Image: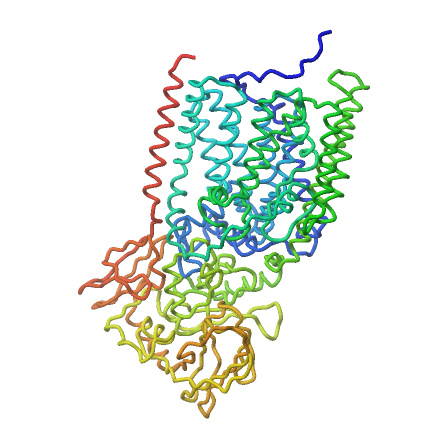
Amino acid sequence: MAPEPTTRPAPPPLPHHAPRPGPRALRGPALAFLLTATAVVLAWAARGSRPFGPRPRALNDQANQYVPFHQGLWDLVHGQGAGDPFFSWRSGLGHQFLADYATYLANPLSWTTVLVPRHHVDLAVFALTPLTLGLAAAVMAGWLGRIAPGPWWQRGLLGACYGLCGWALCDASYIPMWQWGLVALPLLGLAVERALAGSPLPGTALLVALAWWGNFYTAMMATLAAAVLLAVRLVVLRTDPRERIRVLLRAAAAGGTGIALTLPLLLPSYLASTAAQPTRAGSFVPAPTGSFLAGLLPGGYQWGSQARLYLATLGLLLVLAFLLDGRTARRTRGAWGAAAVLTAASFQFPPTQYLWHGLAVPNGNSYRETFVLSGIMTAMAWQGLAARPRPRTLAAAAAVLAAATLLLSRTHDFAPTVPVAVLGGGALSLTGLLLWLRAGHGPGPRRRGPAAVGALLMVGAVLAESVLSGVVADQRRARESWARPRTTAGPAVEDRFAALRSVDGWPAHRTDPGRPEHSYNDGLSLRAEGPQYYSSYLPASTFRALDALGHGSTNDGRTLFGVDNPVLDAVFAIGARVSPDPARPGHWTARTFPAPPLVTVRPRPELPAAPTDSVYARQEAVLGARVYRVPPVTPGPDSPGLRRYRARCAPGTEAYWYSPALLGVLTHDGRSRDLRDRTAGVQRLGPVRADGLVEVTLRTRSPGTAPARPVGCLDRAALGAAVDRLTREGAVRTEVGGHSVRAVLPVGARGTAVVATPASPGWRCSAPLRAFHGLLAVELPPGTREFSCAFVPPGFKGGLAGAGLALAVLLATGLAARRRPR
């Protein structure tokens, strides 16, 4: 018998037309999906998280953005949304919606949330995690079969290792839009294989489009990784220079046309991002090398902005076995090993780190791209397993992994559960591999029995490690203030929702949901129309307009809050509000009050400049009436950590306070409130006493100072007269569409018509636009009886034209391919 060669020949090029997958070919993806989804759900159950226990499930932006945006999508689909895919009248006093959809809702599985009752949408959002991670594992199992042949259950097992990687369990476990990146990478891997095989362009381009349509941010990272995969495959397959050029041209054509198909979402999102309120960008600080490498080991969760790079121990063992297996061609091992090492190194080098993130510093974890390394390592692990590594190779790999665990255990914040996962899971995985190798390929119970036991050990090891990693990540992360779970459903939420419904009057008037209690997007979540809004696409013009009028904010202005201020209620047609019931904890009370229509007219010239540039003067200018007295304020006497202010107003008026730069605990008339951040906005102090004295103390360590005129005293009678005038002279009929408004005005109306919504980019009106304190306003020539405005997201028409051109190219290419003789 001839001895086995020490070096295997390079694999042949892929066939030009791969066979269509049959039902048996779906077994591997099905197993990958089942294992991944099961591990995620078991980790939740182990923690007692909703719906498996009383512990709230929604973390950070899952509560603040994803649940509310999916509830908004549910409303739109079921005909109960105040708006359409272009625009939403709910929250932010009216804002674009297409970019929000493209970012927060474009995961195709997000549409499953519209199939459940509305009060269960939060559970459907939670279910997106096992569904999307399971789908990613299934697609990965399919891609692995295109790289090298092997048993279906092994592809399913390694697909699950990918779907349960550290990035998935630690960083993307509560972010449905990022989770699509895990799907995008193997989709683009399949596109690479199709480009190598010379498959028709339309199918390849559609794979690219599907990857980008789900989430362009992570798709960009996956596309860069696909370029790395293409380079590796070209090196490994030893193609000649001409064929390489043809492959590169096919890949570029598929990538360009596929991305172009997503331009109706991509271009408006890009333009909305450029017009959004900017955030303070930090600088990238690479993690210490030891901590970075420790992220390769499962079972832990490091504090802060760290790279979670791990696969289950089975995957790590097979990656090392692939690199150590001398029977595999050096060219193959060198290409894949270099790709993995250089990709990991690029995460630590600032210029390439910026490249992974689209030349921007991420606001949050600096290692959002690490899933691409998990994909590369999974491909290496599959090739290591498909080569049937020898026992001594596996033993060497296990020794390297154990030594690395021992060395890295000295790094900062090394979780004690890591050795349990690595050594325990490694022992089970190694035993399972050895049993499977001993069983060989032949039939018979002597072979099937050990092989089945080996397979069960490997499956059990992956499941157990992944559940442990998920539980540890949840436990350790929950100790950070930003990750404390929030309640998104229950009696209190339902009571508040019912209170809002009892006073709903849209579009005759807006209803404000009150201070945020459940999320930063309570307006979307509860079907209200107040100023509250949290999105990366909040226009800078909207922030400037509302901030100048005294609205609260946070997140560098990308989160807006409403204020209980009757002047702003009149300006923005707010006629109802809910607030907590002090007599019944967990319950809400609703109140209504007169409000002008959504479209009002300012027939007189604007007020002359107020005596002082204060928030109260700006409110009066927008309202078009004098309703405040803004007295001078006498500061002091102060003491360490305590500042005092005094002013005098007419008895019976209402006193208000505004100091956005001076934060602390404010006390007035024996009542205190916490103003430790800018979310507060203008604060109502209460009725002015009979002596007219307004005294405010602020306990603070803030270095900021109060504005020159922080106190304003509101004359309710003057405000009532202003509201009556705006109502009498405002639109006699207002028709509000999904992204449009039409107003019929009184006879003789002239001056400026003001729509109670910010003048964000994208509005077009039938009358000339006019600048009016950041609100949408038009000039009214004499004789004007009506006008209309419509909102179209900037870039949508251009994106639609680009997508149409790409579709025409694909159709023409497809027809040409069908006519070409085979």
Image quarter of residue 9 = top right
**Foreground residue, 780 or 298?**
298
User: With respect to residue 610, does 20 lie above or below?
Assistant: above
Residue at 40%, 71% (x, y): give it: 568
Q: Residue 251 at what x, y percent from top left? A: 44, 27
Residue at 61%, 32% (x, y): give it: 378
Residue at 49%, 65% (x, y): give it: 513
User: With respect to residue 370, does 696 lie above or below?
Assistant: below
Kindly give the residue lying farthest to the top in the view shown. 1
Q: Residue 233 at what x, y percent from top left? A: 52, 25
Q: Residue 373 at what x, y percent from top left? A: 57, 37
* Left/right of residue 804 with respect to residue 449 in the rendered view: left
**Foreground residue, 317 or 717?**
317
Q: Residue 735 at what x, y percent from top left? A: 33, 58
**Foreground residue, 163 or 584?**
163
Image quarter of residue 740 = bottom left
